Amino acid sequence: MGKRERAKNRCPGCLMSVPLCLCASIPRLVTRTAVLILIHHREARMPTNTGRLAHQCLVGSRLILRGLKDEPARLEASFAGTPLLLHPTEDAVALDEHFQAKHPPPYTLIVPDGSWRQASKMGTREPSLQSILRVKLEAGEPSRYQLRKETKAGGLATLEAIARALGVLESREVEEELGKVFALMVERTLRSRGVSPGQR
């Protein structure tokens, strides 16, 4: 099947192949934390992109394209609550059990989305992000994202990273709901490729 035919056979909502459509399983989660996903334009229409899926799950979240020629990403100078950039630099503050005591809610969680190389540049190249507090996840279970080869040790898919961050900033229930739809997307994609989950 050619590229055009595959595109025609995709659900316009979740971008999965129609027989694998996730739309009926996507939760609508309301959170105090505003989530802003800064997505590289090359990722926006890829069915294996998980940032877009996270956006569909989180009511009130925003998806902003980055990397379009002559069209800079438009970020507001002010954000609702304390802005946090999920960007694991050396000086980033760990999202742990003590975080909220030191940095009270509410928050706007800003998440770069793209390949590791694309995402790592966003925090330094966007002027409006320069002074924002960097945060990072604590070490945890390895990624369950089996659809692309991870180039960085400990790397996570965007939806996994958002889920773990909201597990700290919101609740474990939000983290678990995001985890369920993520696992379903991975499982259905692998099966469409003739691969059983865990086989790789």
Image (spheres, rainbow, N blue to C red):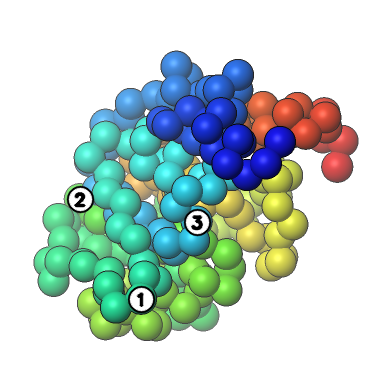
Sequence-wise, the earlier of marks 3 and 2 is 3
User: Identity of the amino acid at label 2?
Assistant: Pro
Q: Residue at x 16, y 61 (%)?
A: 79
- In this view, the mark in front (3 or 2): 3
Q: Is residue 186 above or below residue 103?
A: above
Judged from the image, the secondary structure of the residue bearing numbered disc 3 is loop
User: Identity of the amino acid at label 1?
Assistant: Lys
- In this view, the mark in front (2 or 1): 1
User: In the visual, does 154 lie left or right of 199?
Assistant: left
Q: Residue at x 87, y 35 (%)?
A: 199
Quarter of the image for residue 67 reads bottom left
Quarter of the image for residue 39 reads bottom left
Q: Is residue 52 above or below residue 130?
A: above
Q: Residues within 10 Å of mark 1 (few under 14, many from 20)?
A: few
Q: Is residue 196 above or below residue 94?
A: above
Quarter of the image for residue 96 reads bottom left
Q: Position of residue 153 (x, y in %)?
A: 71, 65
Sequence-wise, the earlier of marks 2 and 1 is 1
Q: Position of residue 2 (x, y in %)?
A: 67, 41
User: Identity of the amino acid at label 3?
Assistant: Glu
State whether residue 138 appears in this view. Answer: yes
Q: Residues within 10 Å of mark 2 (few under 14, many from 20)?
A: some
Residue wearing tag 2: 106
Residue wearing tag 1: 69
Tell me whether the residue at label 3 lies in contact with that at label 1, contact meaning CB atoms closer than 8 angstroms. no
Camera-nearest residue between 140 and 47 = 47
Residue wearing tag 3: 43
Locate the N terminus and report the quarter of the image it occupies.
Answer: top right
Judged from the image, the secondary structure of the residue bearing numbered disc 1 is loop
